[in-house]
Amino acid sequence: MPFSNASSRIRLFAASLFLTLPIVTARAQEEVAEPPRLAWQAGPLTAPIGSSLAEIELPEGYVFLGKEDTAKLLELMKNPVSGEELATLAPASDKASWLVFFEWDPSGWVDDSEKDDLDADALLKSLQEGNRRGNEERKSRGWPTLEIVGWQEKPHYDEATNNLTWAIDAKSEGHQVFNRMVKLLGRRGVMTVTIVSDPNELADASAATDALLTGYHFKTGSTYAEYLPGKDQIANYGLGALVAGGVGAAALKSGLLAKFWKYLVIGALGVAGGVKRLITGRKHIADPPTTV
């Protein structure tokens, strides 16, 4: 198991790393003055996303957080929390540091008739405007802002799976960060899947997430195909608005701690191998993963 007890090794190296990495250590200690205790669960397991909404088959090599701990993690990474965040997935390997967030918007069934009429240029401008509103919230909290530079992957819709996907090229505090989003359309709303990654990991993170999503499904009664015309609520927007605003703008994530989140949150578990996991010199950041 990758989650062997590594607390003694962490304590052994922490002092020496504090001397060699004073700037990073000082910043990490400032960012996490009161470290949250997060109940990571290790795959393989069937992970619930929402109490009775959806679930995903999580294989070995990945870890999972539920709703409350996902909110704690987002606060740690200095991202506004809407209350609709349901879950977090992450690779357990020390060679990967990307994250996947799941957020639910119960806005109703989304008509996908715009699938062939998505204007990428116009949507980008609208998304940038929506992000400016998100930056006002970040500024009010004293957090770094996020700048949307352009498309890394233009919006495209898969009619077979009812998934809308795109990727944003963004910057925060001078660091380039990519958000890749997949909108999973359901009977009563939309599940937003957001990948937060740095440039070097985006391709691997996207491929791994797409593979993971083959194990995702809405539970019976909540699938897109089960929509009942005339009875179920219809969302007051289409596919374009999913990209340009609303849940699209709200789902953007800052990459403030993209390179260090695992060392801050999972490092004490022994998930990440080698010296890198000890950068912060901290321990007891999170609870050991729950045995399932």
Image: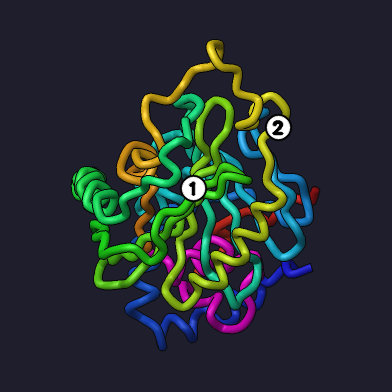
Above or below: residue 274 compared with residue 34: below
Residue positioned 56% across, 11% down in the render? 231
Q: Which residue appears farthest toward the top when viewing the image?
A: 231
**Observer-nearest of 153 and 191:** 153
**Observer-nearest of 67 and 196:** 196
- Mark 1: few, some, or many residues within 10 Å (few <14, many ≥20)? many
The label shown at residue 164 is: 1
* 292 relative position to 158: left or right: right
> Which span of residues is magenta-colored?
257-281
User: Horizontal and vertical percent for residue 170?
Assistant: 31, 64
The label shown at residue 176 is: none
Under mark 2, the amino acid is Lys
**Observer-nearest of 256 and 243:** 243
Above or below: residue 201 compared with residue 187: below
Above or below: residue 106 compared with residue 163: above
User: Horizontal and vertical percent for residue 80?
Assistant: 34, 44
Q: State the SS at label 1.
A: strand
Gap in Å between the C-alphas at discs 1 and 2? 19 Å
Residue tagged 2: 219
Which image quadrant for residue 245?
A: top left
Residue positioned 46% across, 72% down in the render? 280
Mark toward the start of the polypeptide (1 vs 2)? 1
